[in-house]
Image: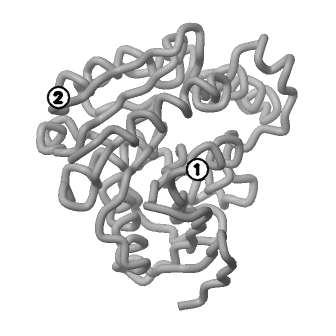
Amino acid sequence: MTDTDTARRIRGHAHALDGTPLAYQREGTGPPLVLLAGQANNHHWWDGVRADFHATHSTLTVDWRGTGDSGKPDEHYSTQGLADDVIAVLDHLGIERTDLYGTSMGGRVAQWVAARHPSRIRRLVLGCTSPGGPHATERDNAVRRSLAQPDAQAAREALIDLMYTPAWRSAHPGPYTTLGDPGMPPHARRRHLVASNEHDAWDVLPEIAAPTLILHGDDDRLTPAANAPLLASRIPDARTHLFEGARHGYFDECRPRASALVSSFLAEPGP
C-alpha cells in the first residue's frame, strides 16, 4: 500500500483485476461517499462540490483508468469493467458498504456497481445520466457535431455551453474542472467514448436495492433529461428531481440546492 496519509486526506493506488493501477483520493472523516466523475475526466471533476459533504462523510474519488494518476492501458473499456475498478478500490480500502454518487458516465458505472453489488451500496445518487442502450434518449446530431468539430477550441466552447448556462458562466468564468483530463492520451479518450456509448444497464436496473435519488438539469442536451424518468421507472424506490434551466453541470451551477438535496437524502434513516 503506497498511501500518503494525513488527518483528513489519503492518496494512494489500488490495483484492478488486470493489474492496472487505480489512483484514489479520500478526504474528510466519517462514513464514505464515493463520487464518480464523467467521461474522460479525473477526480478534479468534483473539486467544486466535494467539500459540501464533509460535515457528514468522507469523500472517495477515483481516477478512471485512462485518466489522472491511474494506468492507461490501450484496450477495451466498458462501464461494467469500470464498475469492477470501483469495487477493487473499495476492497483495497476495506470499505464494505458505502453511499455512491455518480454523474454522467460515472452514473452509468454506478448503475452496475449498485446492481451487481447490492450489499455494498447503502444509498445511490445518479446525476445527469442514462440507462443507455436502445431505451435511452440520446443527444441529437447537432450536439454530436458540435463536439466532434475539428477546431479544438470551438469544440471546447461547445462543451462548456452544454455544461453551463451563459448566465452562470458570466458569473463563474472558470477555469472549469469538468471539461476532460488534459493529460489523457488520445487512445484513452477513444476508449472512454466507446465505454459510455456501449453502456446498457436497462435489464439490471430493477436489481438495484439501494434507495435511489435521480438528479438532472431539465435543459441538459448532452444527456437529455428524458432519461431521468426512464431510470426512475426501472429502479425500485427511486425518486427524481429536475433543476429548472440547468444543463449537464447542474451539480456546479445549482450547487447549494443540489448538494443540500444529496446531503438530505443521505441523512435519511435506513436501510
- The reply to whether residue 45 is in sight is no
Label 2 – label 1 distance at C-alpha = 32 Å
Residue 215 percent across, percent down from the top left: 43, 26
Assess disc 1: are there few (<14), some (14-19) or many (≥20) residues with their C-alpha within 10 Å of its C-alpha.
few
The amino acid pointed to by label 2 is Arg
Location of residue 135 with respect to 105 vertically, above or below: above
* For marks 2 and 1 on the same chain, the one whose residue lies earlier in the sequence: 1
Q: Is residue 222 above or below residue 23?
A: above
Q: Residues within 10 Å of mark 2 (few under 14, many from 20)?
A: some
Pick the front one: 111 or 99? 99
Q: Nearer the viewer, mark 2 or mark 1?
A: 1
User: What residue is drawn where x is 37% and y is 42%?
Assistant: 108
Give the farthest residue toward the bottom: 1
Q: Is residue 217 left or right of residue 150?
A: left
In the figure, residue 120 lies in which quadrant?
A: bottom left
How far from the left and from the top, in percent, is residue 197?
Answer: 40, 39
In the picture, measured across the screen, residue 179 lies left or right of residue 137, that is: right
Residue 64, given in percent of the width and then of the height, sits at 52, 61
Question: 193 left or right of 10?
Answer: left
Seen at 37% across and 52% down, the residue is 99
User: Please, what is the three-letter code of the amino acid marked with disc 1?
Assistant: Ala
Above/below status of 121 relative to 197: below
Find numbered disc 2 in the image and state the secondary structure of the residue it sits on.
helix
Numbered disc total: 2
Residue matched to label 2: 234
Residue 112: x and y, percent?
A: 27, 50
Residue in the foreground of this view, choosing between 147 and 207? 207
Residue drawn at x 48%, y 38% as measured from the top left: 263
Q: Is residue 29 visible?
A: yes
Colour scheme in use: one colour
- The residue to which callout 1 is attached is 55
